[in-house]
Amino acid sequence: MVALNEVPRRRYTAGQTPLQHLRRLSAELGGPQIWIKRDDQLGLTQGGNKTRKLEFLIADAQNQGADTLITVGGVQSNHCRLTLSAARAEGLDCHLIVEEDLGPDGTSLGPAGSNPPEYTGNFLLFDLLDADSVTVLGHGADLLGEAEVLAEKLRGEGRKPYVIPVGGSNPIGALGYVDCAVEMLDQFAEAGLDSPTIVTPSGSAGMQAGLVVGLHSAGSDVSVIGINVSRAQAEQEPKIVDLVDSTAHFLDLPPVPRAATVGLGDYVGTGYALPTPGMVEAVRLFARTEGIVLDPVYTGKTAAGLIDLIRSGRFSSEEEVIFIHSGGVPGLYARAQAFA
Ligand SMILES: Cc1ncc(COP(=O)(O)O)c(C=O)c1O
């Protein structure tokens, strides 16, 4: 087994993120006891789950002698914002290749320029953080293919690019959440939480896969429910399983049982990043009861899933549920209309 503290790592957050009991929200929903892991308070520009992944990815880039980062995502990508923020902190160049959103009915609007991004939220921050380039492509474009073309061009100019996949979700990025699982197990012990259930967003699946591997490797019986933000259950679960397997392999750990990888697909709505009534209710409820602001794309839909599971009797009132706030709040401003 490879020890996590032997893997090269940069540090972008001082100490642990808080684990907080949401008493008022729990009471409003009539139980279970809901706790929140505040990964929205991680370091780099306005925090969020990618900061944990980038601690390992940037160290790997530096070990390979990279001077330039290239990454990809949606026009309001939190991953692109945080990769760019890490690049600024490390003195690296950073190029972003982003894909326009789906149209309001969940269908692609065609070639680049059909659905141009608004100059707000993360897209505004790409400019303020002074990305070396931002290329906007039409929905459905081959973003990673374009990233490789750019990397080749930069190599030809004598640069040393390092391409980070969508969401930072490969076995190296997932190590950030293997580490988070260990951090949370300490916090659970301190708070007297015996066997809570973790509810987490599931997108490119690095966060969920890392958590599953981290919990399993620690011999914990804490279970993880992923709430999908872009795919049906049947499409998402094989992705989680693949990343769980490759991350466990990277760490030289025994295989993790398939039953540990659940990704519920009922809360996506018409498509990735498109608002749903459940998301709007959940964002308002967290804000009104606890003063905590969620994002509309990931944590808002995940909270909508959690609320629905509670209302349909999935948890008893004594059970403990850990909701991971994975960040993403700048994206709220790009979807303000959904709340008007
Ligand atoms: C704020 C936020 N939460 C959750 C996720 C999902 O994490 P993952 O892609 O590792 O499944 C993302 C991914 O972009 C994100 O930006």
Image (cartoon, rainbow, N blue to C red):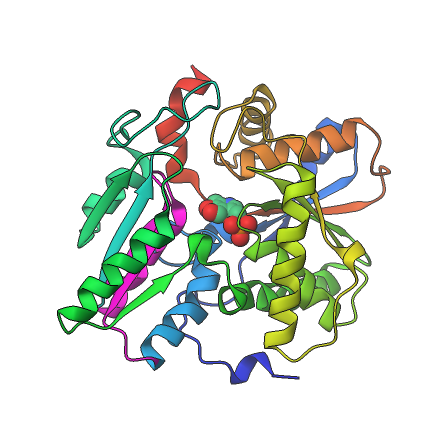
x and y percentages locating residue 20 in the rendered image: 62, 49
Residue visible at 38% across and 61% down in the picture: 164
Is 69 displayed left or right of 331 in the figure? left
Is 299 displayed left or right of 75 in the figure? right
From this view, report whether residue 71 is shown above or below residue 28. Answer: below
**So how many labels did they put on this image?**
0
Residue 326 visible at all: no
Q: Nearer the viewer, residue 188 or 69?
A: 69
Residue visible at 56% across and 27% down in the picture: 279
Q: Residue furthest top?
A: 340
x and y percentages locating residue 7 in the rendered image: 50, 81
Magenta part of the chain: 64-91
Is 313 displayed left or right of 207 in the figure? right
From this view, report whether residue 37 is shown above or below residue 67. Answer: above
- The verdict on residue 33 being magenta is no
Residue visible at 48% across and 32% down in the picture: 296
x and y percentages locating residue 15 in the rendered image: 49, 67
Q: Residue furthest left?
A: 157
Q: Quadrant of the C terminus?
A: top left
Q: Quadrant of the N terminus?
A: bottom right
- The verdict on residue 77 being magenta is yes
Q: Nearer the viewer, residue 166 or 3?
A: 166
x and y percentages locating residue 54 in the rendered image: 42, 64
Q: Quadrant of residue 254?
A: bottom right
Residue 87 visible at all: yes
Residue visible at 75% across and 66% down in the picture: 256
Q: Nearer the viewer, residue 70 or 5?
A: 70
